[in-house]
Image: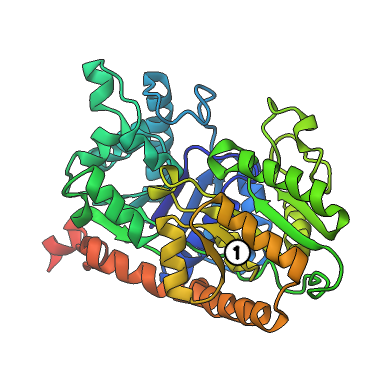
Amino acid sequence: MILVFDMTNSGTAHVPINRGLLEAMALAFPGTGVRFHAEADHLQAVRAAPAMRGLPNLRFTPIALSPLHRWKTHIVSARRFWRELRTIQAALRAAARESAPRGEPHLLVLASTTPTAILAALIAARTARRPVSVQVGLHGNLNEVVGWRSRHPLLRRLDLHAMLARPSRRLRLLVFETVIRDALEAAIPGSRARTDVLPHPVDVREAAGRAAPPPLPEGPIRVGIVGMATASKGIDAYLETARLFRARHGARIEFHIVGGRPGSTPAERFADIAHPVEAGHIPRETFAARMAGLHYVFLPLQPGYYSLSPSGGLMDAVAWCKPVIAARVPITQALFAEGGDIGHLCDDLAGMQAVLEELVTGGPDRARYEAQTAALHRLREGRGPEAQALAYRAILRQGFPELFAPAPSPAWQGARA
């Protein structure tokens, strides 16, 4: 059985990648139960997609995450650790009861995690009565391996850098782009041998049937940044670009934010955005409506952060076949190498603004725009559910061969034989 846990997210956060990962698992192993454990509101957001309801081996189990240090995964907390350990042990006990006649091994997958949850999973695996392995999915918080570390010796032994550097035959890591595995190896030498790569899943169904934006060059050019309006996503550069272009070109260009803003960020900062920017995560229907209306996705990604982090906004652009205007960082450079002409790859913000200026004043090349959307469509199909399922099955077969070994016969059968 595959037991999946999201130990950090709530609501609509990380919904697309969790859907993609769960669908890949369930399709890869249709005869194996997949159990997803997360907070109730996150489960509701994930299971809302029709694709989730069409997977008979996938079930959802609500859990309560610790209220301590939410979103602060770099903090090592003993109280949070005990909650994580009890949660994982309870799930293993439930799985053992369900699969008792078969005696099958289990895989614990931490889809999003804290360092103490990794320790909890390893302890739960070591004390279980049947073989249990652990797979750790790593997202933006992987940057903690090169960030601040406590000087306290115990806390330092339990932070993310230490947990990922600690070799264990039960543990393998999962990242979502090859260039991220390369960057992790540079930060933690020797980690490559324990790290698998699953190309970042995309939701190929959400865009189906959505109305397309007006064809270029008719009407205003609609540009959007995707995700929560935070500094790591380049929101400062985006808002300054919006201010400059709205002053220069008025209604010929619109700037959108396909996401919300942190509650501490005043709404007045978003005066040049074409719509009100809500505090917090936005409903998925609002997200989809805004994505459908865009012509381009604007990605002023920062080299430091995005050396060790995938970009959900970049993958949303692929899922919705929206050409990108992107800063050159390893993940964008690799995706252009894989997909071809999928937009405009620029060396810096000035280059991105120069592309926008040319699009507004000279008008987009419609033939090239259509070719870019076609290239994105081909790229999207290569990261769809069926392709992901094949890739994930290969990852488990190579990295966790014990999951595929025949289950041992119960002792009483051996005594009878």
Inspect this view and state whether residue 84 appears. Answer: yes
Task: State the residue in front, 214 or 106.
Answer: 214
| Quadrant occupied by the N terminus | bottom left
Residue at screen point 76% across, 65% down: 361
Residue at screen point 71% across, 51% down: 258
9 lies above or below 385 = above
Q: What type is the residue that disc 1 sits on? A: Val
Q: Is residue 141 left or right of residue 283?
A: left
336 lies above or below 265 = below
Percent from the top left, x then y, of residue 262? 67, 32
| Quadrant occupied by the C terminus | bottom left
Count of labels in the image: 1
Q: Residues within 10 Å of mark 1 (few under 14, many from 20)?
A: many
Colour scheme of the picture: rainbow
401 lies above or below 135 = below
Task: State the residue in front, 360 or 149.
Answer: 360
Q: Is residue 269 left or right of residue 176?
A: right
Task: State the residue in front, 43 or 382.
Answer: 382
Q: Hey, which quadrant is residue 182 in on the image?
A: bottom left
Percent from the top left, x then y, of residue 362? 74, 70
Percent from the top left, x then y, of residue 157? 23, 26
Q: Secondary structure at mark 1?
A: strand
Task: State the residue in front, 57 or 65.
Answer: 65
Residue at screen point 23% across, 67% down: 398
Residue at screen point 53% across, 28% down: 70
Q: Is residue 56 left or right of residue 188?
A: right
Percent from the top left, x then y, of residue 233? 56, 44
Q: Which residue is mark 1?
A: 324
